[in-house]
């Protein structure tokens, strides 16, 4: 049973906007999406911000790293120019700002906890604690958020702080001890790379009672294929090709 949206905009707006920014969330919304995945990392002073890479250079102009930069400086950084000059005013957003944007617009969140190397437990703890705090102050307008992470330690730390917030374990490929990992994390779902999923593994995951979520599906026919294997949902970069209501037409 998958109580979440089935089709999710990857990094906010997929490949149509600068990833992990409020502009990306707005882009997803403009394309009709009410479900997003995004990546969260800690600043030097422990503030969760949206960022995929630990180092600057690809999506943020400059040299340096997220874990060695204060939040007040990160939030001023240009996170849009790399994508297109018309996004030059787009800045790195805080997780809190994105959370509030999503609640205002009734967008469900798959919060990927993306620790910089060495900050796994701390990132899991801080993201879980802030999420818990925000959830307490709001009347939730969507299904509850779902945490995910490739970091077992980050998810375990999140579970210790906020066991009530559901967790999905991200595995890029099949690992023989996947069941044990999911049990230890008390996870509700396994999230994996659609390129590595096989029909038989999908069957095992579903038979074990877990949700099954894939990244990143950019062709409608591939979406239909993996859904026929039992996949519950997936994120996409092609929010123009695979629309929010895709699953209804599979
Ligand atoms: O959460 C699914 C997907 O986002 C994982 O890969 O590298 O895009 O964060 P990545
Ligand atoms: Mg991600």
Image (cartoon, rainbow, N blue to C red):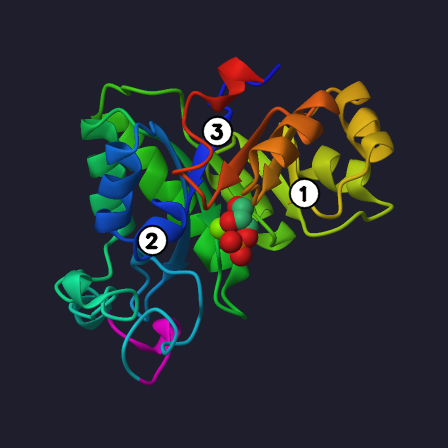
Location of the C terminus by quadrant is top right
Above or below, 45 relative to 246: below
At x 49% / y 65%, what residue is drawn?
119
Q: Which mark is residue 194?
A: 1
The segment highlighted magenta reads 63-70
Dot 3 crowding, Cα within 10 Å, few <14, some 14–19, many 20+: many
Marks 1 and 3 sit apart, C-alpha to C-alpha, by 14 Å
Q: Which mark is residue 20?
A: 2
Q: Secondary structure at mark 2?
A: loop
SS category of the residue bearing label 1 = loop
Residue 173 left/right relative to 149: right
Magenta residues, dominant SS class: loop
Label 2 vs 1, first from the N-terminus:
2
Residue nearer the viewer, 9 or 4: 9
Q: Nearer the viewer, residue 198 or 177?
A: 198
Which residue is labeled 3 in the image?
Answer: 7
């Amino acid at each position: 049973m998958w109580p979440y949206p089935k089709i999710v905009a990857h990094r906010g707006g997929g490949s149509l906007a600068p990833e992990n920014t409020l502009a990306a969330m707005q882009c997803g919304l403009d394309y009709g999406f009410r479900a997003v995945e995004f990546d969260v990392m800690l600043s030097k002073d422990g503030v969760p911000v949206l960022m995929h890479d630990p180092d600057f250079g690809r999506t943020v102009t400059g040299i340096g790293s997220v874990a060695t930069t204060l939040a007040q400086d990160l939030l001023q950084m240009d996170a849009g120019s790399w994508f297109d000059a018309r996004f030059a005013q787009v800045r790195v957003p805080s997780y809190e700002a994105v959370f509030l944007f999503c609640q205002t617009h009734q967008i469900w969140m798959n919060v990927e906890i993306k620790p910089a190397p060495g900050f796994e437990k701390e990132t899991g703890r801080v993201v879980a604690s802030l999420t818990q705090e925000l959830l307490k102050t709001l009347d939730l307008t969507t299904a509850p958020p779902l945490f995910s992470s490739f970091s077992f330690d980050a998810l375990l730390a999140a579970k210790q702080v906020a066991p009530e917030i559901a967790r999905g374990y991200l595995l890029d490929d099949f690992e023989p001890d996947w069941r044990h990992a999911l049990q230890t994390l008390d996870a509700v779902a396994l999230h994996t790379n659609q390129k590595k999923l096989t029909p038989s593994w999908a069957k095992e995951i579903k038979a074990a009672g877990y949700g099954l979520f894939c990244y990143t599906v950019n062709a409608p026919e591939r979406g239909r294929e993996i859904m026929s294997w039992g996949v519950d949902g997936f994120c996409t970069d092609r929010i123009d090709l695979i629309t929010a209501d895709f699953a209804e037409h599979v």
